[in-house]
Image (tube, helix red, strand yellow):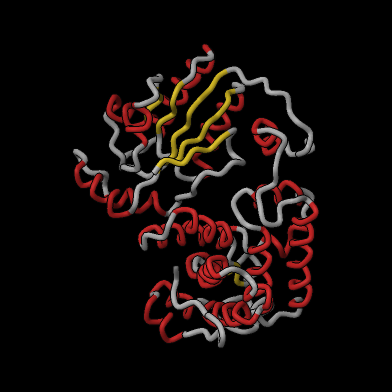
Amino acid sequence: MLEPVPRPPHWRVDWEALDQAWSFLWPMKECPQAPEYHGEGNVWIHTRMVCEQLAWLPRWRELPQAERELVWAAALLHDVAKPACTRPGPDGRLTSAGHARKGAVMARALLWRLGVAFERREQVCALIRHHMVPFWILDREDSLRLLLEVSLTARCDLLSVLAEADARGRIAADQQELIEDTWLFAELAREHGCLSQPYEFPSEHTRYVYFRSPQRSPGLEAFEDTRSRVTVLSGLPGAGKDTYASRLSLPQVSLDAIRAELGVRPTDDQGPVAERARERARELLRRGEPFVWNATNLSREQRQRCLGLLADYRARVELVYCEAEHDELMRRNAEREPPFPGAVLERLLERWEVPDLSEAHSLKLVF
């Protein structure tokens, strides 16, 4: 995936080869870190220490080769967004708030361009997205909800291994406490049956209701009182959403169609388009009529704007995520009339978050 990966019998990290192969590592060398948490120095030094510690961890060495590769890629990329996120906080100390989430987005675009298979790519991105969770989850009042959400996309056993290497690969006063937190996280996941697999809810609707009302018990089956069915599409322009929607023979709330009606370009303010879409969705929801919501819906925040509306009307929601390989998507875009602006596509890639099962009743992947 991101070669070279340390292998037996010597488990050596070939930094010269990595430095030559992956230019995304270079900005880390110029990114400082808060010395109270990272006395070792900049992000590059920390990343090297994390990878060296990972290569020597018995828990990592005992994994199957394919799983070692996933954790290795996540270790190399876990702080890839720190150069973009690091800044002085209100007290003057350096902070890199949001780097885990942004790092997952950056890794997704990078691995997509490299042609990494979807399932493997998304496992790496989930590890990056949640790599800080084992350090503080036990201090959260909503620790169970967070654990179950993490388990839907990330292998908690692999996440624990990554976090232990992250803790060991630094100089900090609380290092031993952080290491122990990673072990406790694994025990918490084991206790709730989601160490190496997603937490199993009694039903799709129970899962859906739980993540919207986390004060509920996740094991208590929820009565389903949905009134309609809505298919919400998600994916980059050219990923195949229109083709999929055309096969369903259902009314559509299509943002592309609304843009054409209003004469709004993709580079213009999209506020009027979104408001018109919500108006049409409300009309269909009031009638209880099934329909398709056809939009990019690329970020979790963006999806919640329509998913929140659907929840208010007690709709049963199927998320359909469409994806095409990089070269194929570029070819399709070149054939569009007019082509989707490259600058807009780049901005979309900067907030590209693949949907997960905490957001809807069901999730379908279309390639």
Total residue callouts: 0
> In the current view of this chain or complex, which residue is farthest to the top?
287
Q: Position of residue 180 (x, y in %)?
A: 78, 71
Q: Examine the rendered structure and indicate whether residue 120 appears above or below residue 72.
A: above
Q: Quadrant of the N terminus?
A: bottom left
Q: Residue at x 63, y 73 (%)?
A: 60
Q: Is residue 221 visible?
A: yes
Picture coordinates of residue 91, whole percent (x, y): 66, 68
Image location (x, y in percent) of residue 364: 49, 38
Report the side of 59 relative to 24 (left or right).
right
Q: Quadrant of the C terminus?
A: top left
Residue at point 22%, 43% (across, down) = 339
Give 161 or 9, whichever is nearer the viewer. Answer: 9
Residue 60 vs 367, above or below: the answer is: below
Residue, x 52% and y 44% (percent of image)? 355
Q: Is residue 303 left or right of residue 264?
A: right
Left or right? Give the position of 70 relative to 184: left
Q: Residue at x 76, y 67 (%)?
A: 183
Quadrant in which residue 158 is drawn: bottom right
Residue 112 against residue 363 in the figure, above or below: below
Residue in front for this viewpoint, 29 or 127: 127
Q: Is residue 79 visible?
A: no
Percent across and percent down for residue 210 are 71, 36
Above or below residue 154? Residue 23 is below
